[in-house]
Image (cartoon, rainbow, N blue to C red):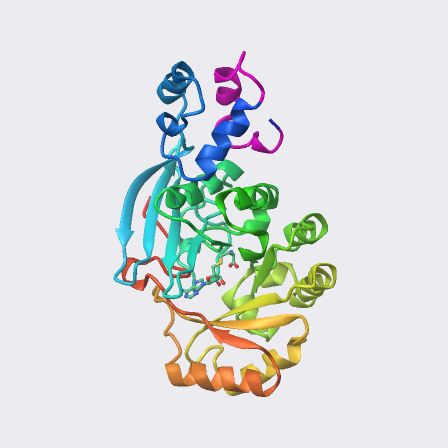
């Protein structure tokens, strides 16, 4: 079955397809990847096989528990894995027609970034590649999707093998590697593996949030474990191998990391050949106040003045707690 083998429960699928020609798994995957909601739609399978599969093999490894819709068109879905772990994913609809799905790589997150709600919930476990693909497939059944970001719950580089396996399958769903982004806090062992192994042009994003080491450690305790200089060197290695710029994510916290001098330190840290900055308006999670639009504009202007390509992220889904850093469930 080659590259189809991780999708759904492999043992069950193999068992159900015993005695069938080898191409059956591929046929089923092709239907699912194009958004089929059930086996009944798979008209090139024999009817008895369709009926048997429908009865015995769920089409998804995760079950939808709740869906919320934002005024801006964003949809947030809460799923449960078969062992009851909560997982959230988000579909963002942009005016230019772009459809971006934000996937979770873990249920909860073991890291404790102070501004992020996911770090405050219980860490469950790493998700499998199938559980990640099934989040995207849920939205693929609603409409075509063209971008995926691994920016939901969890730290992708703590689960790098499964994240890579899922990313490799996304083109079958209509999402090219160039339109796929994996975001990390800078978890070095996983990041190294990602740079070594992924020769597809999947985009890399680094959550930086502070150029000064002491402040970054305060905001993101993981900074004590993997020094920023090593992480940035690894990002440079990615750029040298893939010729794709690395996105720097920087959440704007009033009075904490948004002063113009801090924009200057950030500009000194970053090579404009290698990095582009994406400033993220803070989405309320309790502990901080977001920077004012004026402070964000001044920070952006200073970075640009120093030659750093900079954009400000469009906030989506805040009214349904679906925005960056807001994914968290009570149980
Ligand atoms: N663990 C990975 C993947 C999650 S990406 C990582 O952190 O990169 C989620 C992005 O949203 C990260 O850049 C994160 O720093 C940012 N974020 C977290 N909390 C936020 C908040 N309250 N407001 C805005 N962005 C936030």
Q: Which percent across, then down, holds residue 187?
A: 61, 55
Quarter in which the C terminus is drawn: top left
Q: Quadrant of residue 272?
A: bottom right
Q: Nearer the viewer, residue 26 or 215?
A: 26
Q: Which percent across, then down, holds residue 214?
A: 58, 72
Taking the magenta stretch, the answer to whether it contains residue 323 is: no
Q: Is residue 131 above or below residue 302?
A: above
From this viewpoint, which residue is outermost toward the front?
44
Q: Which percent across, then down, holds residue 38?
A: 36, 30
Q: Quadrant of residue 224?
A: bottom right
Please tell me which residue is depicted at 44% across the width and 21% down the height of the picture. Answer: 45
Q: Nearer the viewer, residue 28 or 220?
A: 28
Q: Is residue 182 shown to the viewer in this render?
A: no
Quarter in which the N terminus is drawn: top right
Q: Quadrant of residue 276?
A: bottom right
Q: Is residue 49 shown to the viewer in this render?
A: yes
Q: Nearer the viewer, residue 157 or 22?
A: 22
Please tell me which residue is depicted at 35% across the width and 19% down the height of the picture. Answer: 55
Q: Is residue 142 left or right of residue 280?
A: left
Magenta span of residues: 2-22
Q: Is residue 291 above or below residue 9?
A: below
Please tell me which residue is depicted at 32% across the width and 47% down the height of the picture. Answer: 330
Q: Is residue 64 left or right of residue 4?
A: left
């Amino acid at each position: 079955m080659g590259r189809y083998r991780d999708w759904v429960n492999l043992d069950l699928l193999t068992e159900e397809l015993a005695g069938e020609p080898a191409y059956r798994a591929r046929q089923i995957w092709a239907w699912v990847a194009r958004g089929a909601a059930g086996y009944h739609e798979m008209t090139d399978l024999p009817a008895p096989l369709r009926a048997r599969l429908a009865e015995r093999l769920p089409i998804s490894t995760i079950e939808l528990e709740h869906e919320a819709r934002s005024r801006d068109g964003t949809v947030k879905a809460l799923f449960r894995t078969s062992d009851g772990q909560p997982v959230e994913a988000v579909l963002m609809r942009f005016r230019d027609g772009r459809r971006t799905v934000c996937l979770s790589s873990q249920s909860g997150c073991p890291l404790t970034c102070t501004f992020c709600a996911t770090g405050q919930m219980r860490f469950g476990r790493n998700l499998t590649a199938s559980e990640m693909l099934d989040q995207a497939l849920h939205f693929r059944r609603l409409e075509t999707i063209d971008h995926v970001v691994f920016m939901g719950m969890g730290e992708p580089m703590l689960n790098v093998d499964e994240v890579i396996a899922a990313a490799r399958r996304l083109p079958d769903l209509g999402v090219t590697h160039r339109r796929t982004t994996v975001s990390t806090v800078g978890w070095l062992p996983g990041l190294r593996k990602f740079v070594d192994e992924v020769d597809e042009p999947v985009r890399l994003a680094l959550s930086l949030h502070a150029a000064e080491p002491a402040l970054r450690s305060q905001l993101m305790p993981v900074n004590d474990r993997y020094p920023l200089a090593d992480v940035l060197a690894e990002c440079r290695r990615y750029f040298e191998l893939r010729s794709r710029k690395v996105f720097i994510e920087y959440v704007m916290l009033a009075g904490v990391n948004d002063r113009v001098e801090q924009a200057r330190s950030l500009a000194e840290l970053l090579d404009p050949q290698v990095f582009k900055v994406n400033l993220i308006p803070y989405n309320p999670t309790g502990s901080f106040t977001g920077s004012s639009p004026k402070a964000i504009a001044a920070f952006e202007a200073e970075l640009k003045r120093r030659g750093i390509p900079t954009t400000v992220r469009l906030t989506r889904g805040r009214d349904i707690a679906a925005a960056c850093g807001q994914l968290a469930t009570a149980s």
